[in-house]
Image: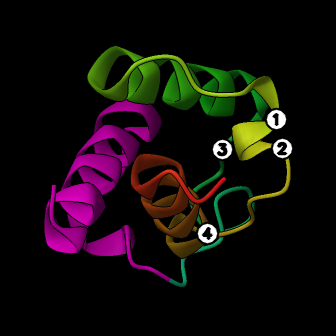
């Protein structure tokens, strides 16, 4: 899966789960502050990514702050670097 494909999947899930305009879901958008995500939203995002890519470690989204952080974490996990 290409880096662009990973970014597209993450952005699409963010738009759907957070119910925000796609234009707001940029790499530097802060999940909590800009997109108003709460802990339940992040848990739902984690489940959605697991549905797409298989089991992910529980702590996968524990330290992410931006959409770009989620994309970078997904890239690492999918490449097997973590």
* Badge count: 4
Q: Residue 69 carries which label?
A: 4
* Residue highlighted by disc 1: 59
What is the distance, in whole Å, between disc 3 and disc 4 at their CAs? 14 Å
Name the residue furthest bottom. Answer: 28
Magenta span of residues: 1-27
Q: Is residue 24 above or below residue 44?
A: below
Residue 15 within the segment the image draws in magenta: yes
Dot 3 or dot 1: first in sequence order is 3
Tell me which secondary structure the magenta stretch mostly adopts: helix
The residue sitting at 65% across, 51% down in the picture is 36
State if disc 1 and disc 2 touch (CB < 8 Å).
yes
Report if residue 21 is visible in the image.
no
Screen quadrant of the N terminus = bottom left
Residue 52, percent across and down? Answer: 28, 24
* Residue highlighted by disc 2: 62
Dot 4 or dot 1: first in sequence order is 1
Secondary structure at badge 2 equals: loop
């Amino acid at each position: 899966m290409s880096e662009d494909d990973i970014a597209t999947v993450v952005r699409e899930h963010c738009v759907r789960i957070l119910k925000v305009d796609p234009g707001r879901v940029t790499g530097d958008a802060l999940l909590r502050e800009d997109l108003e995500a709460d802990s339940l939203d992040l848990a739902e995002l984690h489940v959605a990514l697991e549905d797409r890519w298989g089991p992910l470690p529980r702590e996968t989204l524990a330290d992410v702050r931006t959409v770009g952080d989620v994309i970078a974490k997904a890239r690492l996990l999918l490449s097997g670097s973590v």
